[in-house]
Structure formats: C-alpha cells, structure tokens
Amino acid sequence: VDEVVVKNVSFSVPLQKSAWRENEINMLSDTFPDMVGKNVIAAPAPESLDAAAAAGVYCLDAGYQSLIFVCSTVPTEDITYNILVLGG
C-alpha cells in the first residue's frame, strides 16, 4: 500500500480598508493555491481580531486562486487574515 502524503498550505492576506467595494473584497492571485473542493479555514490574525469582529468580516468563498471576503460594515483599519488550506 502506497502512503499518500497530504500537505496543508497556509498563508496570510492583507485586507486593506481602501479595497472594500460594496462590503466585499474579491482577491485573485496566482500565488494562491487552488482551493476548489478543499477545506479552507480563514481566521483573522490575532492583531486583527477586534477590528474584524467589529466590522463583521468573514471569508465567504474560496475558489481557484481566489478568496472573497465580506463585511457588515467597512472596517476602519486594515485587517490581516490567516488562511489554512487542508490538503492544499
């Protein structure tokens, strides 16, 4: 039996307060892994937790080299999100 090694991929993304359009940021990058059909965990970095919670920021979708974030109100400061792609 061959052993399958599954690697997780982690990275951080900056959500700049000036980048929000209609309470959404659609991020596309060829440096992002393909996240289609994978389990993706997105959480604010510790230093951004309060600002993300106050603005209701969360990751709505992860796709092919893309992430979509939404908020209930536009944040008043830049926010950093940590992303973990399981089996990435």
Image: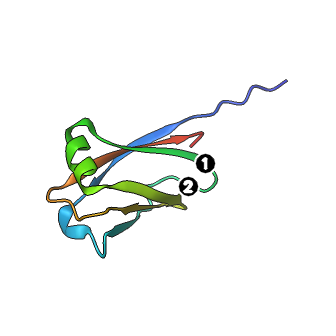
Q: Residues within 10 Å of mark 1 (few under 14, many from 20)?
A: few
Q: Is residue 36 left or right of residue 69?
A: right
Can you give x and y, in whole percent of width and height, for residue 3 in the image? 75, 25
Question: Label for residue 49?
Answer: none
Question: Residue at coordinates 56% horizontally, 43% vertically from top-left?
Answer: 88
Question: Residue at coordinates 25% horizontally, 64% vertically from top-left?
Answer: 73
Up-down relation of residue 60 to residue 87 (above or below): below
What's the CA distance linking mark 2 and mark 1? 8 Å
Question: Label for residue 34?
Answer: 2
Residue bearing mark 1: 38
Up-down relation of residue 71 to residue 54 (above or below): below
Q: Residues within 10 Å of mark 2 (few under 14, many from 20)?
A: some
Up-down relation of residue 15 to residue 21 (above or below): above
- Closest to the observer: 87 or 25? 25
- Closest to the observer: 35 or 50? 50
Quarter location, residue 59: bottom left
Can you give x and y, in whole percent of width and height, for residue 14 in the image? 27, 54
Q: Is residue 34 left or right of residue 23?
A: right
Please tell me whether mark 2 or mark 1 is closer to you in this view: 1
- Three-letter amino acid code of the residue under disc 2: Asp
Question: Residue at coordinates 32% horizontally, 55% vertically from top-left?
Answer: 57
Total tally of numbered discs in the picture? 2
In the displayed image of the protein, which residue is found farthest to the right?
Answer: 1
Can you give x and y, in whole percent of width and height, for residue 69 in the image? 38, 61
Marks 2 and 1 close (CB-CB < 8 Å): yes
Label 2 residue SS: loop
Quarter location, residue 16: bottom left
Can you give x and y, in whole percent of width and height, for residue 28 in the image? 42, 66
Quarter location, residue 30: bottom left
Viewport quadrant of the N terminus: top right
Question: Residue at coordinates 52% horizontally, 46% vertically from top-left?
Answer: 40
